[in-house]
Image: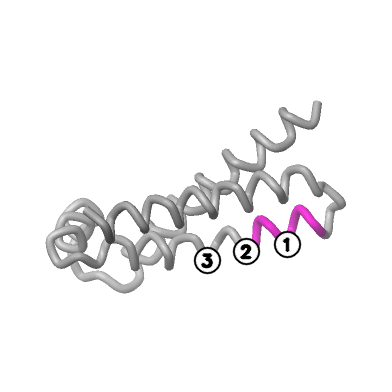
């Protein structure tokens, strides 16, 4: 049961991150989403875009804490750490 709750939190965190990236690009980029991601990668700004997208994870994290869903909040935290690891890999390679 706990594993399922954490997995749900990870899924919510990753989806929130993706939605945050899309929302950021729609609001602040004049290009379409695909071209914006390509340009961000070419200019070595993709990590920054992912980090800004991860801000939506805060809402999910604190929402789960408020609802007393601590294991789901742990999952969101793990998803945020996954995002940080991806950003680290992008910076290294």
- Residue situated furthest bottom in the rendering: 28
Which residue in the structure is indicated by mark 3?
Answer: 55
Q: Is residue 23 above or below residue 16?
A: below
How far is the residue under mark 1 from the one under mark 2? 6 Å
Question: What residue is shown at x 60% (from left), y 44% (from top)?
Answer: 12
Direction from residue 40 to residue 53 in the image, left or right: right
Question: What residue is shown at x 73% (from left), y 44% (from top)?
Answer: 72
- The answer to whether marks 1 and 2 mark residues whose Cβ atoms lie closer than 8 Å is yes
* Observer-nearest of 34 and 57: 57
Residue 63: x %, y % from top left: 74, 58
- The answer to whether marks 3 and 1 mark residues whose Cβ atoms lie closer than 8 Å is no
Direction from residue 77 to residue 89 in the image, left or right: left
Question: What residue is shown at x 28% (from left), y 55% (from top)?
Answer: 90
Q: Residue 70 colored magenta?
A: no
Residue 2: x %, y % from top left: 79, 31
Q: Main secondary structure of the magenta part?
A: helix
Which residue in the structure is indicated by mark 2?
Answer: 58
Q: Residues within 10 Å of mark 1 (few under 14, many from 20)?
A: some
Number of marks in the image? 3
State the colouring used for the structure image.
Answer: one colour
* Observer-nearest of 31 and 44: 44
Residue 51: x %, y % from top left: 42, 64
Residue 62's tag is: 1
How far is the residue under mark 3 from the one under mark 2? 6 Å
- The answer to whether marks 3 and 2 mark residues whose Cβ atoms lie closer than 8 Å is yes
Magenta-highlighted residues: 59-65
């Amino acid at each position: 049961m706990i594993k399922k709750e954490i997995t749900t939190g990870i899924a919510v965190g990753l989806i929130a991150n993706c939605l945050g990236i899309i929302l950021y690009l729609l609001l602040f980029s004049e290009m379409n989403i695909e071209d914006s991601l390509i340009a961000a990668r070419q200019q070595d700004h993709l990590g920054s875009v992912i980090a800004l997208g991860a801000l939506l994870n805060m809402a999910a994290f604190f929402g789960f804490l408020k609802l007393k869903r601590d294991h789901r909040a742990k999952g969101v935290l793990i998803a945020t750490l996954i995002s940080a690891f991806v950003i680290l890999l992008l910076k290294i390679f």
